[in-house]
């Protein structure tokens, strides 16, 4: 479980917001939270560290997998300079428009489609 004491804008709030693995979270695209400063407002909270490695009542490492629209992924790839850019754009355009895209890292190589 992860406890936050701020809203999506990063402003302090009195009530604690509790999230657990698999929860969708809403965050402001901010360099501290989203290093690439991309317009991803939603993410899925995931655990990075196995529970058995964490001592009782200690913090457990987590990560946010950002959720993007198909158009956003097209825009990011189009603005980049990947060697196989045309092929990648073609593959993305063939994907279902109802898919969301999640990214767990800071490079486009970690983007993959997901149906919600």
Image: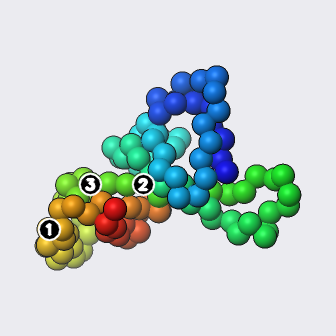
List the residue tagged with mark 1.
93
- Nearer to us in this view, 10 or 115: 115
The answer, for residue 70, to whether it is visible in the render is yes
For mark 1, give the secondary structure: helix
The answer to whether residue 58 is above or below residue 114 is: above
The image shows residue 105 at horizontal and vertical percentages of 47, 62
- In the image, taking residue 89 as reference, residue 100 lies left or right, namely right
- In the image, taking residue 26 as reference, residue 74 lies left or right, namely left
Q: Which residue is drawn at 66% across and 41% down?
A: 3
The image shows residue 35 at horizontal and vertical percentages of 47, 48
The answer, for residue 76, to whether it is visible in the render is no
For mark 3, give the secondary structure: loop
Crowding near the residue tagged with mark 2, few <14, some 14–19, many ≥20 C-alpha atoms within 10 Å: many
Q: Which residue is drawn at 79% across and 69% down?
A: 53
Q: Which of marks 2 and 1 is nearer the N terminus?
A: 2
Quadrant into which the C terminus falls: bottom left
- Nearer to us in this view, 109 or 98: 98
Quote the CA–CA distance across marks 3 and 1: 12 Å
- Quadrant of residue 97 in the image? bottom left
Q: How was the colour assigned to the protein in this rendering?
A: rainbow
Q: Are marks 3 and 1 in contact (CB under 8 Å)?
A: no
List the residue tagged with mark 3.
69
The answer to whether residue 64 is above or below residue 5 is: below
Residue 66 is labelled as: 2
Quote the CA–CA distance across marks 2 and 3: 10 Å
Outermost residue, right side:
56
């Amino acid at each position: 479980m992860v406890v936050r004491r701020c809203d999506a804008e990063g402003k302090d709030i009195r009530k604690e917001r509790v999230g657990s693995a698999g929860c969708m979270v809403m965050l402001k695209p901010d360099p501290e939270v989203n290093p690439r400063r991309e317009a991803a407002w939603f993410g899925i909270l995931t655990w990075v560290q196995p529970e058995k490695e964490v001592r009782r009542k200690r913090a457990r490492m987590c990560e946010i997998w950002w959720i993007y629209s198909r158009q956003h992924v097209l825009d990011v790839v189009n603005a980049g300079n990947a060697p196989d850019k045309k092929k990648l754009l073609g593959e993305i355009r063939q994907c279902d428009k109802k898919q969301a895209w999640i990214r767990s890292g800071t490079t486009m190589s970690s983007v993959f489609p997901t149906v919600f």
